[in-house]
Image (spheres, rainbow, N blue to C red):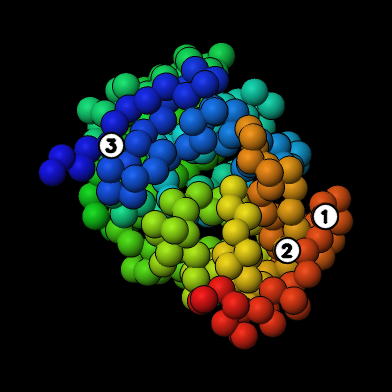
Amino acid sequence: MNDRPDHHITKDGSSTLYSKKYDQYYHNPNGSVSESKYLFFETPNVVQVLRENKLVTFFETGFGTGLNFLLLLDYYLSNECKSEVHFYSVEAFPVSAGQVKEFNYASFSDFRELDPVLKNVFTNLKEGMNVIKPLDEVDITLHLFIGRFENFKAEKIQADFVFHDAFSPEVNEELWTVSTFEKLKSMAKSDAVLSTYCAASKARAAMAVAGWKLAKAKGALGKREMTLTSLSDEKLTEFKRLNEERLIERFKAGDFDR
């Protein structure tokens, strides 16, 4: 069987892939770029922090097509940021540099220097950690780990933002467990914000058991809800809070195993 993902154009005109392995799209078919901007940049207020011109660290579960990283570069350049940025990401099944040529994400940016970035990133990747400076003129470093999340060593990472962008719990359950969210917690600052498209109660309960505070916001492009979490109550004050204690009770009672 050919496991090479199929390229598709979503409703906002931007690229995505369809995974035969997971039988899912990498992004919302209603719009890859629109969804990622809303979920990972606009809702958790990433741009506001980038503008503060201080050290900002990201951790992403699932590098996928590299869209979130390219959007980060675009936001950084658009806002004339001076922050030092470190972007950590994990990807078990990287796409080929040849397939990356099909992606049209750079056409959604005014900065032509972004055109070759993803092709350059995906060329000559090796197993383990790859450290890449995509643009000489910006202080952004990509730390891309090729391998499984369980094999990623989390020392010294203190993320301001966590993008949990794995395939859904139905097909990629191992990235939605209590142990996964405990590991993400160990890599997060005390006021970090984790954002994800997922609103499943079982996944939210795993986050709560791992010690995250939870809130919900309107979902992207036709989805009813998304989830935001933090280790700080203050970071969630503008969102509708969820009842972590009730989720933990249900998790311990086995409600989600039936």
Q: What percent of the width, then of the height, locates residue 26?
A: 42, 40
SS class, disc 2 = strand
Q: Residue furthest left?
A: 1
Q: Residues within 10 Å of mark 1 (few under 14, many from 20)?
A: few
Q: Nearer the viewer, residue 36 or 135?
A: 36
Q: Residue 190 appears in which quarter of the rendering? A: bottom right
Q: Residue at image x 23%, y 50%?
A: 126
Q: Is residue 34 left or right of residue 20?
A: right
Q: What percent of the width, then of the height, locates residue 52?
A: 75, 41
* Residue picked out by circle 2: 214
Q: Is residue 245 above or below residue 149?
A: below
Q: Residues within 10 Å of mark 2 (few under 14, many from 20)?
A: many
Amino acid tagged 3: Pro
Q: Residues within 10 Å of mark 3 (few under 14, many from 20)?
A: many
* Residue picked out by circle 1: 240
Amino acid tagged 2: Leu
Amino acid tagged 1: Lys
